[in-house]
Amino acid sequence: DTGVSQDPRHKITKRGQNVTFRCDPISEHNRLYWYRQTLGQGPEFLTYFQNEAQLEKSRLLSDRFSAERPKGSFSTLEIQRTEQGDSAMYLCASSSLAAWYTGELFFGEGSRLTVL
Amino acid sequence: DQQVKQNSPSLSVQEGRISILNCDYTNSMFDYFLWYKKYPAEGPTFLISISSIKDKNEDGRFTVFLNKSAKHLSLHIVPSQPGDSAVYFCVETSGSRLTFGEGTQLTVNP
């Protein structure tokens, strides 16, 4: 396992469609995070999991967004009824329990969403 | 309300010279500050951190300085190399979430 992997790398969809992104973290990492990055901005926190439990959600995560990590391994982020404002890079990251406090996360390459 | 501010969107330096990237923050109740580096088409990667109880941390060519009275953070890279060309994010951590600045694009010219 060489790092955090995300799929798909790029998704183009029409407004109103649903999309789902998958993240496979580094296998021994307990914590998994989702961030969103728009053009010219730094990544913004969306939510994080410790094992299968979703422990914190940002107010950015509207009710159209849902994230799961059913078995404490991979995670999915689903966006329902997509809007043009959802166009962004969705980044997944993972960390060990020992490293989370210092902020040392390992990020994937991201999934870019374009909503037409 | 931006809690971490990087006022310079870009910086260009010559190879071998010093690069200084700056960051201002508003939240005094933080645990760590970090710098992340991002190349195009890749995710951000951790570079260096400093805890709230220190004023300097050094790792090879990279040194981070923390001035708590001024609420200012800086990253020094010396000597700068062309491979250092990337976007650098100043990041605050308190609890489980990271708060990123807007980023500074560093270009090191050969």
Image (tube, rainbow, N blue to C red):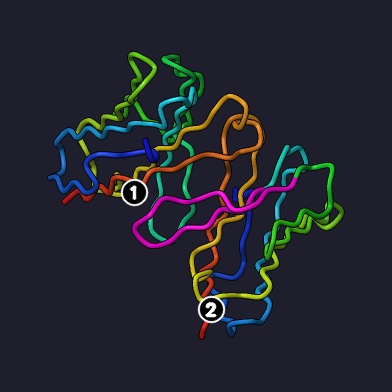
Q: For numbered disc 1, what is the local secondary structure?
A: strand
Picture coordinates of residue A7 (x, y %)? 24, 39
Residue at image location 49% in from the left, 25% down from the top: A31
Compared to B23, does A78 lie above or below? above
Give me the disc on residue B86.
none
Q: Is the magenta region chiefly helix, strand or loop?
A: strand
Q: Chain of mark 2?
A: B
The answer to whether dots 2 and 1 both sit on one chain is: no
- Left or right side of B64 for A7: left
* Residue type, mark 2 in image: Val
* Residue type, mark 1 in image: Met
Q: For numbered disc 2, what is the local secondary structure?
A: strand
Picture coordinates of residue B30 (x, y %)? 73, 39
Circle 2 crowding by C-alpha within 10 Å: few under 14, some 14–19, many from 20: many
Residue at image location 56% in from the left, 53% down from the top: B36
Residue behind mark 1: A89
Compared to B63, does B95 lie above or below? above
Residue at image location 63% in from the left, 81% down from the top: B16
Picture coordinates of residue A14 (x, y %)? 12, 45
- Left or right side of A43 for B100: right
Q: Which residues are magenta?
A: B34-50
Tell which tag, 2 or 1, sits nearer the viewer: 2
Residue behind mark 2: B108
Q: Chain of mark 1?
A: A
Residue at image location 72% in from the left, 44% down from the top: B27
Compared to B94, does A74 lie above or below? above
